[in-house]
Each structure stands twice: as structure tokens, then as C-alpha cells.
Image (tube, rainbow, N blue to C red):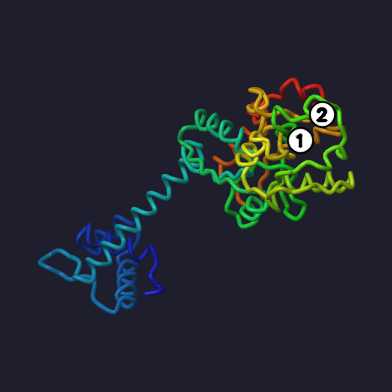
Amino acid sequence: MKNITLKHFRVLSAVTKMGSMAGAARSLHVTPPAITVQIQQLEQAVGLPLLERIGDKTTATSAGQIMLRTAQRIELLLAECRQEVEQLKGVAGGHVSAGVVSTAKYFAPKALAAFRQRHPGVEVRLAVGNRQETIRALRDLELDIAVMGRPPENLDLQSASLGPHPHIIVAAATHPLAGQKISITDLTNETFFIREPGSGTRILMERLFEEARFDPIVGMEIGSNETIKQAVIAGLGIAFISAHTVAVEIADGRLVMLDVAGLPMMRQWYVVRLKEKAVMPAAQVMWAFLASEGHRFLPQPIAEWKSTL
């Protein structure tokens, strides 16, 4: 049945609806011989008669009824498809697959929630992962948009800056170096809790330490900013971390930012998308929203690092 077309189905439906070949021809604005040819082609493809004459009316055989039910399902799917496409055109519907690196989860969900309030008909699917996972999802066309740090150079991306992204070294509030002006080398005897390989924070930390020729004591590799924060609060060590992930803990005195020369290390947040991926209207509107208003959702710098931004 590989040669069956939508036209065949519609002709069969018209014949059974109108009760005759002539009636179907009138409703479809074609000639009766054209209808006859379409039915013959369809019956040849199926291998069974599809129509029979009962009195003065043409009706469907058992095989014809099966084909008619299939035609109805096809028309229903096409109608649903048209409706979804129309919704996309008006941004009244559709969906966006958004990815954020794990460090961005401290502000990105607020931005997406604000977008949903403005466009309640758009379904937003959020994926959180580390830098490598987010880059892979972009490359594999799983994401429409992603929020991350420095865009990877090996992908052809469009990007827009959201705002500054400071990185600092934090310690427990009672740490003996709190409040002192120090250098990286003053941290030689300190134990560091660090992010896992592949995370943006880990990559940035390694670059900083390499430039300073500093070899830290690593207490543990941890794939969660929350776990790192709790370990530092408990006084088990210190950490190089995004300032946006610890703003609350610094504000309430559970953590302090160590006054290390050369820090904060400043980078930028970006919203990115793969150029080769088709951009639907809903994704286009989210892109415009984040590019123009995403900066409003970044954690505000507190007094301890405000003067350096």
C-alpha cells in the first residue's frame, strides 16, 4: 500500500459520503472519470474491493470501512497539526526546551517563571546539567536555548550576554583569614572543595590556579554547589565558587568572601542557541526576553564585592 496518497483517501470518503461517483465528482470539483481512476488505483493498492452498490447508493465494503477509519484518523491528525502550527505562529502555544548549567539554577528559574507569566500558553521544559552536559544537549539539538558561561568555541552558536558573573573564594564565617587581605599563595595549607571535571567553575578555577602557579590541596571533588557550601559552612575547607551561588549565605553571615588579590574573577552569563536549529516562534520570544531582560534576575552583588564589579 506504499502508493496510497491522501488524495485517494479523500476520494473514497467523498464517494461514501455523497453515495455515488458523480456526487463525489461534484463535491471535489473533478470529473466522474477522475473519481473512477482514483478508486481503481486505491483498490489495486489494497487488493480488495472497497465499494459496493446497494440499491441506488454506493457504500463501503468491510475493507472500505477500514480505509475510511484510517482516513478519519489522518484528517484528525492533520487538524491537530494545523492547530498546533497556528498556536506557534501566535506564540499562544508551543514549547521551548531550555537548558541551564547547574550554577545558573540560582537565578534562571526565576527568569523562566517571569517568562511564563507573560506567555502562559507556552510550555517550558527545563534541563539542568553541568557545562559538558549542556553543550552536548545543544549539539544534539535537544535544547532550543541554554543559559551558561563562556560559549564553547567548537559550536556555531548565537549568543547574547546577560550580565556579569563574579567568582570568589569563600570560607566559614569563623575562618582565621576572614577580613584579611591575602594572596593565592596564602592559601597553600587550605583544603579546597572543588567542582567535578567538566563544570564551568572547575575550568575557571584551574585557569586561575595555573596562572598563579598554585597547587591546591583538594579535599574532595563534588558535583553539587549545595554540598560544597555546606562543607565550607561546617569549616571543613574553602571553595572557589560562583558568587551568585553563595549570595544568600554571605548575606546571612554563614559564609565570608576571602579578600584574595585578583578576585573576584569576572566572567559573563550568556543565553545561547545553536544556529543550525530551527527556531520556533515561542523559542524566539524567549530568546528576546532573556537577551533583553535576563539581567534583572541575576543576584544583586552585596557590599563585600560590589566595588569590584
State the residue position of label 1: 169
Residue depicted at 25% across the width and 67% down the height: 66
Q: Nearer the viewer, residue 63 or 101?
A: 101
Q: Residue at x 57, y 44 (%)?
A: 98
Task: Identify the mark nearer the N-term, 1 or 2.
Answer: 1
| Residue ID at (23%, 75%) | 49
When asked about the image quadrant of residue 242, the answer is top right
Residue 5, image quadrant: bottom left
Residue located beneath label 2 in the image: 259
The answer to whether residue 77 is above or below residue 33 is above
Q: Secondary structure at mark 1?
A: strand
- Residue 6 lies left or right of residue 104; in this view the side is left
Residue 270 picture location, percent across and down: 70, 39
Of residue 143 and residue 35, the one placed in the foreground of this image is 143
Q: Residue 194: image x %, image y %?
A: 71, 46
Q: Is residue 209 left or right of residue 141?
A: right
Tell me: residue 135, above or below residue 173: below
Dot 2: few (<14), some (14–19), or many (≥20) neighbours within 10 Å?
many
Crowding near pointer 1: few (<14 within 10 Å), some, many (20+)?
Answer: many
Left or right for 64, reference 41: left
